[in-house]
Amino acid sequence: MRKMLMLVISFLAVNAMAQSLHRFPDGWDKDMESKIERVLEQLTLQEKVALCHAQSKFSSAGVPRLGIPENWMTDGPHGIRPEVLWDEWDQASWTNDSCIAFPALTCLAATWNEHMSQIYGKAIGEEARYRNKNVLLGPGVNIYRTPLNGRNFEYMGEDPFLASRMVVPYIKGVQSNGVAACVKHFALNNQEINRHGVNVIVDDRTLYEIYLPAFKASVQEGGAWAIMGAYNKYRNQYCCHNDYLLNDILRKEWGFDGVVVSDWGGVMDTREAALYGLDMEFGTWTDGLTEGLSNAYDSYYLAQPFLKMLQSGELSEDVVNEKARNILRLIYRTNLNPHRPLGSFGTEEHALVGRQIAEEGIVLLKNDKKTLPFNISIGTHILVVGENAIKPMTVGGGSSSLKAKYEVSPLDGIKARVGDNAKVTFARGYVGDVLTVQDGLRSSTDLSDNRSKEELISEAVSAAKDADVVIFVGGLNKSSGQDSESNDRASLGLPYGQDDLIEALVKANSNLLVVNISGNAVSMPWVKSVPAILQGWFLGTEAGNALASVIFGDTNPSGKLPFSFYAQLDDNGAHALNAYPGGDDVEYKEGLFVGYRWLDKHNIKPLFSFGHGLSYTSFSFGKAIADKKTMQIDDTIEFKVSVKNTGSVAGAEVIQLYVEDVKSSLPRPIKELKSFRKVWLEPGEEQVVSMTLSKEDLSFFDDIKHEWVAEPGDFIAHIGNSSTNIKSKVRFVLE
């Protein structure tokens, strides 16, 4: 019944998506450019400049006398931020701005399912549209370079190909509502420590092969209408006005015709902002009107200082005209688009879309002796332990903080699922951050507890001895120094003494499940003794229900890790080379070898591999074959492999294809993800999966020639279900 409901929801979402896309007929904007030029001719210089900077925390001016509407931004990418006061971060105290909280983007990436990305984008776009926001500040696609980055939970993992494939449907889904997706943070925003000043030193090859592909796909395949600059520097220029990134790459190489928006407070110079690719400036003085000026926004870099440079002739009016064109194009695509749908907000349908994504993104990391799913009967005693079982995760974390319509905790989800069929008790186990407050938004759950660590562990262990099943729900949270903007984590380990607690629990009761709630990898010194481990992510509004569905077998887990889990921090390249966090500069010494690429190169065994994820059923792979042994440079090559569900329940498997260049003129990773397919199979069902590669999939970036090169020679296709679990290899030649 549950599966049928999800299929119906999925069908309705796809059908609605098709209908909304149909509202944008080919050529609907064929007159847009001529309209823009006609409006531009009527604008005064002052009006053009006013378009280029904020007028409040989250809005910029229109042109009232011409009927040109304002632009209204909203933070995402996991839900629509509550309204804040005009000049302050604090809440406006509206009573009708409680949104649906969707799973964090690490969870979306873990589905390895482009359809999930499509319905996610469409649903959150509908919420933004209903709230009259025409720019959604997301999604984020910065690469997972270090597991300490506090903002990793907002991104799509360590692999540029996976992030590229998952971001495109999200963008299309959002923009089908007449809402611009603003892809962020462009580029190299891979740490929160010193994020406002650090200068990233990275070679062009690494830049193009690792850190740019998801942005390029966002522009050229997703058709993104907006890009947000990053706080950090690159080539000693701030990324929000970086000539190489914004003018040379984004505009000239990729043909981007949308707007470039600064991150809030990311602009540092008027002349550079004018000349080096920025269109819209936000958040420069984030304390509003306390600077003693009648209107602080008029003193932004792209406000009065910009106007004076234009009036004096120091800057040509062509400079502001180009920015105004880009901004007007944004407005015509969104607020002045007569075909955009109406949107909807806080609906049950959106909550169920979020739940479906959450269930599909949860990763079963370990399941010895088929511990999961838990089978319960009348009288079964389930003990739930851990602060994260009761702690709300929607408030906090930085710009992703949300005022959610509701949030089902893991404890409440478990209780609702088992009903009267089992006894559910709770023990705190550890105390972390008892109060979460951000921008005047406060968690309503009272987590205060003054007991000592020893008292808490003793209580939990005593209860575990009397329980039939123990479910520990811990991990990280959305507090500073955990998974949160503005600061990175201090270590790879779990905070608040959780490792000691888990070790004590498993000694008291071996029938233990550990659920790690986080957007980051953590170390697990107890991994060998704990029989079952789930990676739970930040799952949003339906978090508890989604977790319970997997724990008790209503949903067969099919998530795969979008980044590697390390046994120790030095197994990561950036840390092994002491190339994080840097000082004024941070050099990416590991180059191309990020994540599984580094592990492969140095033959390091991960704690859990990129692409890893177990199921409640089993799958067998046949021998992969190619449709040819030799591939011409202008041709493609197709690989086929049969996959069979050899277990007793329906489930999904992700077939992953990695490419190895046997001999290259430049160093290359041992293998790189270049294709994947997710397939659903009934018990006993077998399906032949096809994946195709082109020369682009075999190419590397030659930074001397500044072009992509596919060198003739031998290649190997590695096909399996994780980066370390390769089932079949096929050798072929590129001529």
Image (cartoon, rainbow, N blue to C red):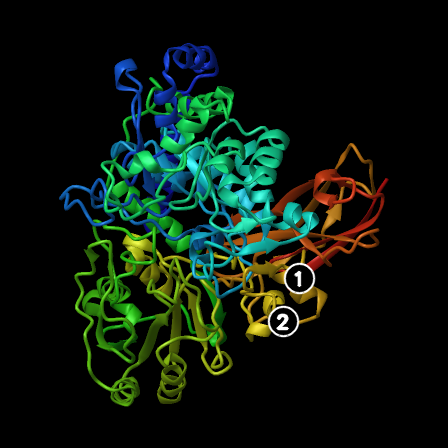
Residue 692: x, y in percent?
Answer: 68, 40
Q: Quadrant of the C terminus?
A: top right
Q: Which residue is mark 2?
A: 576
For mark 1, give the secondary structure.
loop
**Contact, mark 1 vs mark 2 (Cβ under 8 Å):** yes
Residue 624 in the figure: left or right of residue 570? right
Classify 384 as above or below 300.
below
Residue reaching furthest to the front: 312
Can the viewer see residue 379?
A: no
Query: Which residue, given by chain and number where applicable, does mark 1 sit on?
Result: 590
What SS does tag 2 mark? helix
Q: How far is disc 1 from disc 2 in space, using C-alphas?
A: 9 Å
Residue 327 in sight: yes
Amino acid marked by disc 1? Glu
Residue in front for this viewpoint, 492 or 15? 492
Q: Amino acid at mark 2?
A: Ala
Around disc 2, counting alpha carbons within 10 Å, would you say few (fewer than 14), some (14 to 19), or many (20 or more)?
Answer: few
Please indicate whether residue 278 sits to the left or right of residue 119 in the image: right
Q: Please tell me whether residue 197 is drawn above or below residue 40 in the rendered image.
A: below
Is 266 placed left or right of 352 in the picture? Answer: right
Name the residue rendered at 30%, 69% in the picture.
388
Q: Position of residue 18 (x, y in %)?
A: 41, 27
Q: Residue at x 26, y 85 (%)?
A: 456
Q: Nearer the viewer, residue 469 or 264?
A: 264
* Residue 67 at x, y percent in the picture: 28, 16
